[in-house]
Image: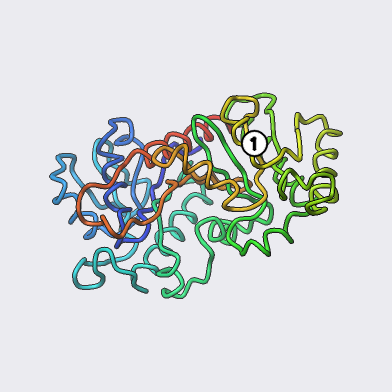
Amino acid sequence: MASQFVGITMGDPAGIGPEISLKAIDARDEYKQSVLIYGSYNVLKYYHDLLGMQTPLVQIDKVADFRPGKINVISVVGLTLGKDLEIGKVSPVAGDAAYRYLERAIGDAMQGDLEVITTAPLNKEALHKGGHMFDGHTEIFATLTQTKSYTMMLWSEKMSVVHVSTHCSLRQACDRAKKPRILECIHLAQQAMQQLGVETPRIAVAGLNPHSGENGLFGTEDLEEIAPAVAAAQAEGLHVDGPVPPDTVFLKAYKGVYDIVVAMYHDQGHIPMKMMAFDSGVNVTLGLPIIRTSVDHGTAFDIAGKGIANVESMLYAVDLGKRFASGRH
């Protein structure tokens, strides 16, 4: 029988990750039956006390030891605030710890102990200082699961987006907008929406250039790379339009014309999503052998330790992970 557990990795211990991880489980009785945290027990205990939580905090060694009705913690790295790291400060210790939480959770998920991993934010500078030279969560998951075909999806109740490229320069992003990669992302978008219960997704593929190149006047990538990818997907029977001019495609998706948009680069997809669903958006890594969802915000070092972090995105992320899991059954 497949595991029903969700593992939250608490992210950078100097950020708001520990706080929102605790708040999420404390907020929902159902989470107390199936959601646990991978992190550092002493850091979580500090926030548990700061927030005056009544739900008991317990440390366990493995998922099989889960104790229902409590906030369960697998303490991967022993850390103490004020001694090993400072709240709201970039440090190699915190960056390394954030990676170790992920490494343990991914290992557990790969062996079937977890159904979903939901990640709290890490800090990329701290991650690098800690010796882990990844661009972010997505690349860590791809590497540790040995996944070659993957992409980042941003989901909200109003609109969803997948990205042809993410963490690279804009110049590199233009070079990465190639037919095989675009078609790959169309397929990943199709599969994701079907897992979420949309049998025949309506997919829009955004253009790269202004007005989708205006028939070659403002660049040829739309004609030479995007249009052929769309034609190939249509020949497979997928409901795909494109290249749709990028200045209107997101408005159309927001109004319900499309279920999901394939964006050509990071900011093309992220800006409209953050405008619309900053507190309720969810980041999903598509193409993995396991389910990974994440909050769609950063470590918020400026408010870390103040007890005021908004838990809404974490709740959406856990719930969306459960929806993806249901779609796989």
- At 63% from the left edge and 34% from the top edge, which residue is drawn? 260
Task: Judge left or right: residue 161 versus residue 47.
Answer: right
216, 265: nearer the viewer: 216
Mark 1: which secondary structure?
A: loop
Quarter of the image with the C terminus is: top right
- At 32% from the left edge and 65% from the top edge, which residue is drawn? 77
Three-letter amino acid code at disc 1? Thr
242, 239: nearer the viewer: 242
Q: Residue 25: which quarter of the image?
A: top left
Q: Is residue 278 above or below residue 122?
A: above
Horizontal and vertical percent position of residue 82: 19, 69
User: Dot 1, crowdedness within 10 Å: few (<14), some or many (≥20)?
Assistant: few
- At 27% from the left edge and 64% from the top edge, which residue is drawn? 88
Write down the residue under mark 1.
248
Task: Judge left or right: residue 231 versus residue 151.
Answer: right
Horizontal and vertical percent position of residue 36: 34, 45
